[in-house]
Amino acid sequence: MIIRSSKQQPKNTLLKRFPVSHNFGVAPASRTEPGKSWPAPASATCIKAIKVYRYDPDSGGNPRLDTFHVDLDRCGPMLLDALIKIKNEVDSTLTFRRSCREGVCGSCAMNIDGTNWLACTRPLDETADPVTVYPLNNMPVIKDLVPDQTHVFAQYHSVKPWIQTKEPAPPDRERLQSPEEREALNGYYECILCFCCTSGCPSHWWNGERFLGPAALLQAYRWLADSRDEATEERLDALQDPFKLYRCHTILNCTRTCPKGLQPGKAIAEIKRMIVAREH
Amino acid sequence: MATTNRPLAPHIQIYRPQLTSVLSFSHRVTGIALSAGSVLLVIWLITAAAGEQAFYPLQSFLGSWAGLALLFIWTYSLFYHLCNGIRHLLWDSVIGLELASVYLSGWIVVFASAILTAGAWIAASLMAP
């Protein structure tokens, strides 16, 4: 089936996960164990099961998979509403990031039914039953659904995501762009840094230490494409590296998972083309 | 804050297989199969040059069901890697990276490699003495 937009869910899936063992390559302390089951209130008639990855740094145990049963008649429409309801009414220790609840802040990015998305923009009726919720992949877990994003933000910082100029700004006005020059940034400036793409990228799973990942590279291209930026050569010099850029093998899980419908894969291809073009 | 003992969130163990990642993994696997197949081709040529005693056992193995299955996998790998390689060339020219095009070209690769493999084997069986 043809997927036209990243928000489109597959109608049927042959495999829910790759045919590898649940503990394939997993360090003993990271192995997930079965957890508790929390029943729905006796009065509930429309119940949805939500399996949630739990990790408590203070208890010292392994991560576990708890199952919550939520009364859908007394719950908002989105997955984030269900998580907030669980935190308010069932288990106040459930920990997750959230802020804007409308898909512009990128805080509640998590792995939902095996792909990354924002909990606030994923309706509960578009999820499986039970719906499975993990923290963003391949990141150290601080607690429950809160991953440590220090490394990916450091990678973002490394592409110098700010304007770099050599000429001083005109004394009487801002640095102006034509509408066409501004249009070149469309599809790149909208990134909210939720890191759904980077944590869903197999190449970043295997080489995440050195490969910058789709989110940072999309931002790198956003500044390469900016007509006001004057550090294009320096930026390309910094990116021309077998690991930082060229570990991208055009798998395109990034474009498939982006909650904002952006195309990190295309941005990376544009960078690769710029590097080839300047050598000829 | 201690960061050393934190568990790592699972990735390949739980991520949903999608056309994007499955075709990419298949490209790697068929590439490895092609390398092994070209070694087999060289061995076949060496035994052919070495004479009938060396050639006959390998040739009869390749004519058996197991040998034919191996050759079938090899031809499929060849056509899959070829078709997906063309897709990669287009991507390198920044063509077809929109999600709908990625899925369309992905399914085209899946069906084209199957049709080419079937066609090659039908042609081979028609030309066989």
Image (cartoon, grey):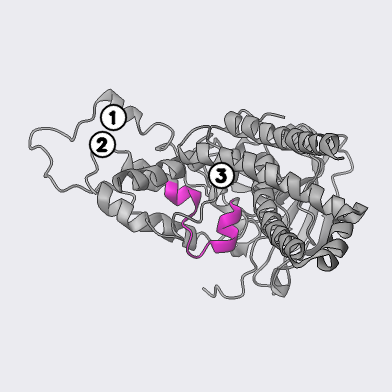
Q: CA distance from mark 3 to mark 2?
A: 26 Å
User: Which amino acid does the dot numbered 2 rest on?
Assistant: Ser
Which quarter of the image is occupied by the N terminus of chain A?
A: top right
Residue name at image x 49 percent, y 33 percent: B95
What residue did someone put label 1 on?
A181
Task: Report the front residue among B10 and B24.
Answer: B24
- Which of marks 1 and 3 precedes in the sequence? 1
- Which of marks 2 and 1 precedes in the sequence? 1
Regarding residue B73, the answer to whether it shows in the image is: yes
Q: CA distance from mark 3 to mark 1?
A: 25 Å
What residue did someone put label 2 on?
A227
Say which quarter of the image contains residue A125: top right
Q: Secondary structure at mark 3?
A: helix
Residue name at image x 88 percent, y 59 percent: B61
User: Which amino acid does the dot numbered 1 rest on?
Assistant: Glu
Please report the bounds of the magenta region as a residue range.
A201-217
Q: Secondary structure at mark 2?
A: loop
Q: Is residue A159 above or below residue A33?
A: above
Query: What crowding class fits label 1: few (fewer than 14 Cα within 10 Å), some (14-19), or many (20 or more)?
Result: some
* A232 with respect to A78 (left or right): left
Which quarter of the image is occupied by the C terminus of chain A?
A: top left
What residue did someone put label 3 on?
A254
* B105 with respect to B49 (left or right): left
Q: Chain of mark 2?
A: A
User: Which amino acid does the dot numbered 3 rest on?
Assistant: Cys
* A199 with respect to B123 (left or right): left
Q: CA distance from mark 1 to mark 2?
A: 6 Å
Task: Report the front residue among A166 and B106.
Answer: B106
Q: Position of residue B2 (x, y in %)?
A: 54, 75
Q: Secondary structure at mark 1?
A: helix
Residue name at image x 57 percent, y 56 percent: A203
